[in-house]
Image (cartoon, grey):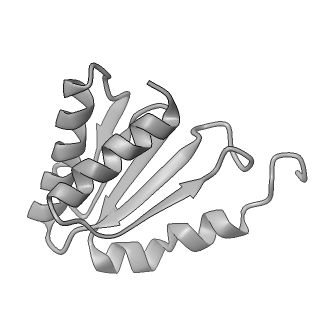
Amino acid sequence: MDSEQLKKLVIDALEEIKAIDIVEIDVRDRTSICDVMVIATGNTNRQVKSLAESVVLKVKAAGEQPVGVEGQTVGEWVLVDLGDVVVHVMQPQTREFYSLEKLWEMAPNKQES
């Protein structure tokens, strides 16, 4: 499955469980760790965990395996590594504090570094 198909699957899974403010960031020209980052918000640790679990279940049902999942115990920020797509599901205060969108927006292109 290519990164675009995987990204669509992730966004569908997040939308099904009412994730808030889903943002996709194409980072191909900024890093080699992945092609796309998807960031979403859940209002509670329970919703954050459920959103991440929904992503994992959809991906597995499509025949793919996550590389890893971090942060499920606490549920403040769960990262789901799918290889070409990395998913960050956070509570509002965590998302605001880390401002990943701004961080990646300011990151230089690989060719510029």
Residue 93 drawn above or below residue 103: below
Name the side, left or right, on which 94 lies relative to 84. Answer: left
Residue under the image location 79 percent in, 59 percent down: 108
Viewer can see residue 79: no
Residue 74 screen position, x and y as percent: 18, 57
Q: Residue furthest right?
A: 112
Name the side, left or right, on which 113 lies relative to 93. Answer: right
Residue 84 drawn above or below residue 79: above
Residue under the image location 50 percent in, 51 percent down: 37
Q: Residue furthest left?
A: 46
Residue 62 found in image quarter? top left
Viewer can see residue 81: yes
Residue 60 screen position, x and y as percent: 22, 26
Residue 8 screen position, x and y as percent: 38, 45
Q: Nearer the viewer, residue 99 or 58?
A: 58
Name the side, left or right, on which 30 lies relative to 58. Answer: right
Residue under the image location 72 percent in, 50 percent down: 30
Residue under the image location 24 percent in, 64 percent down: 76
Residue 75 found in image quarter? bottom left
Residue 70 found in image quarter? top left
Residue 95 drawn above or below residue 75: below
Name the side, left or right, on which 36 lies relative to 30. Answer: left
